[in-house]
């Protein structure tokens, strides 16, 4: 089979790495890919959001299956367009991808179907949003309604932070049209856990739990990023909590999407808060999370292509998805200044010294004159597996010490809590 993966970050590299193990795949393509992905797949210079060009490439090259990884092309209807061209794809159709593309849709869905989440209100007028936060007080959460590269959420600890968030989203258009509507939520407390689920429209198979680290600096300080590291599984996510989530969140969400005429196929990401009143939904994503995918897929034993095709074909209930024992940890090495201003083009040193038991997932890199250069905010995801989480964390950080590039930045406390 010829398989095309859409995207070009660390998440996509982790998918490519897993798919490359499948004996069914003869040729892997990735569009646009990156420097590291080029070692395992043929990279194609097409933007992930260019639906027409992606479909044309798939047709011209007789691609058998397409994996649409990022949120933007899913929200634009890339899966619909591929299906219309007779090409099967992994990922939700546009009418189901709205579960991530519109936070107001997802919050209203949870309210309608009694899925536990934070109390919220939706606003399209800045003055009314400002009045509401003054009524509710801080801490409070302000979310841009649309897609904002994982940076459209502000957990405001003070009224000033909340006001600034609303003004930047609605007044200054920091996220463009994505912030024209905002969702304002109560601030929940408790450990956060991510659970990604394979879904075939009706059946679902949860993956290992994981924990992401969103803030740029140690001790969960600084601005929100796309994620500075993750580990799996989460010790906080017990079998008892897993069953509660299946009964009150996972199954009801899949059923709700069916009831709404929007059956979900692909990877449905549940961002959860384990509150004193039980697990509640923080957010949904319509795709694999980044960097959670890196440690989670590092522990997958079953052929990823078989699972993805079962999701597409509606036969997930006929497949047993198996996972390795132990744990995995991913440390993100980012460009200095990320998620704000940062520079690109620095040579990355030390990649040749990494052992076989460590995998370096490339996120923002490019290959130029046989040298890997930085080419994004998040540059590398150094990922290790081990029998215990503590051992996996230690191995990952030992590997990080052997890699360098100018102004490299990473947190030193991933998994320490």
Image (cartoon, rainbow, N blue to C red):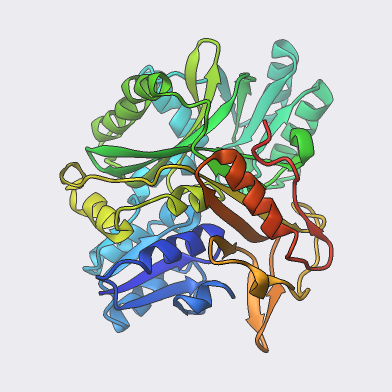
Q: Is residue 408 left or right of residue 88?
A: right
Q: Is residue 33 left or right of residue 144?
A: left
Q: Is residue 70 left or right of residue 258?
A: right
Number of numbered markers: 0
Does residue 128 lie above or below 276 as drawn? below
Occupied quadrant, residue 81:
bottom left
Which one is nearer the viewer's eye here, 62 or 184?
A: 62
Does residue 15 lie above or below 299 as drawn? below
Residue 126 appearing in the image: yes
| Rendering coords of residue 320 (x, y %) | 22, 45
Which one is nearer the viewer's eye here, 51 or 274?
A: 274
Is the N terminus in the top left, top right, bottom left or bottom right quadrant?
A: bottom left
Does residue 327 lie above or below 302 as drawn? above
Residue at 20% x, 47% y is 319
Is the C terminus in the top left, top right, bottom left or bottom right quadrant?
A: top right
Residue at 57% x, 72% y is 36
Occupied quadrant, residue 135:
top right
Which one is nearer the viewer's eye here, 325 or 8?
A: 325
Residue 80 appearing in the image: no
Residue at 39% x, 27% y is 109
| Rendering coords of residue 217 (x, y %) | 78, 42
Residue at 83% x, 67% y is 406
Does residue 335 lie above or below 104 as drawn? below
| Rendering coords of residue 271 (x, y %) | 50, 33
| Rendering coords of residue 70 (x, y %) | 48, 56
Q: Residue furthest bottom?
A: 369
Which one is nearer the viewer's eye here, 53 or 117?
A: 117
């Amino acid at each position: 089979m010829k398989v095309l993966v859409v995207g070009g970050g660390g998440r996509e590299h982790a998918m490519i790495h897993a798919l490359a193990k499948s004996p069914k795949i003869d040729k892997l393509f990735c569009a646009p890919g990156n420097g590291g992905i080029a070692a395992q797949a043929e990279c194609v210079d097409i933007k992930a959001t260019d639906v027409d060009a992606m479909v044309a490439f798939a047709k011209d090259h007789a691609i058998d299956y397409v994996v649409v990884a990022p949120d933007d092309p899913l929200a634009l209807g890339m899966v619909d367009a591929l299906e219309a061209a007779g090409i099967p794809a992994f990922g939700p159709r546009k009418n189901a991808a709205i579960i991530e593309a519109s936070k107001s849709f997802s919050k209203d869905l949870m309210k309608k179907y009694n899925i536990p989440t934070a109390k919220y209100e939706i606003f399209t007028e800045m003055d009314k949003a400002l009045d509401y936060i003054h009524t509710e007080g801080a801490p409070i959460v302000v979310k841009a309604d649309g897609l904002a590269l994982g940076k459209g959420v502000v957990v405001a600890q003070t009224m000033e932070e909340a006001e600034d968030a609303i003004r930047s989203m609605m007044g200054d258009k920091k996220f463009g049209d994505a912030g024209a509507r905002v969702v304002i939520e109560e601030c929940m407390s408790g450990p956060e856990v991510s659970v990604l689920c394979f879904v075939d429209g009706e059946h679902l198979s949860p993956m290992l739990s994981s924990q992401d680290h969103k803030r740029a600096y140690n001790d969960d300080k600084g601005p929100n990023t796309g994620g500075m590291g993750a580990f799996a599984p989460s010790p906080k996510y017990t079998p008892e909590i897993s069953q509660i989530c299946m009964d009150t969140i996972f199954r009801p969400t899949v059923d709700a999407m069916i009831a709404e005429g929007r059956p979900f196929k692909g990877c449905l990401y549940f961002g959860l808060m384990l509150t004193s009143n039980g697990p509640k939904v923080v957010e949904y994503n319509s795709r694999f999370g980044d960097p959670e995918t890196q440690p989670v897929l590092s522990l997958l034993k079953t052929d990823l292509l078989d699972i993805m095709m079962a999701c597409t074909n509606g036969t997930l209930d006929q497949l047993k998805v198996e996972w390795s024992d132990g744990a995995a940890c991913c440390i993100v090495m980012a460009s200095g200044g990320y998620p704000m201003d940062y520079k690109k083009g620095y040579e990355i040193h030390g990649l040749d010294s990494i052992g076989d038991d460590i995998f370096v997932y490339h996120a923002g890199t490019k290959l130029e004159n046989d040298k890997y250069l930085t080419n994004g905010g998040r540059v590398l995801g150094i990922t290790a597996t081990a029998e215990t989480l503590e051992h996996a964390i230690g191995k990952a950080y030992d590997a990080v010490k052997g890699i360098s590039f100018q102004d490299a930045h990473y947190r030193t406390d991933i998994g320490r809590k």
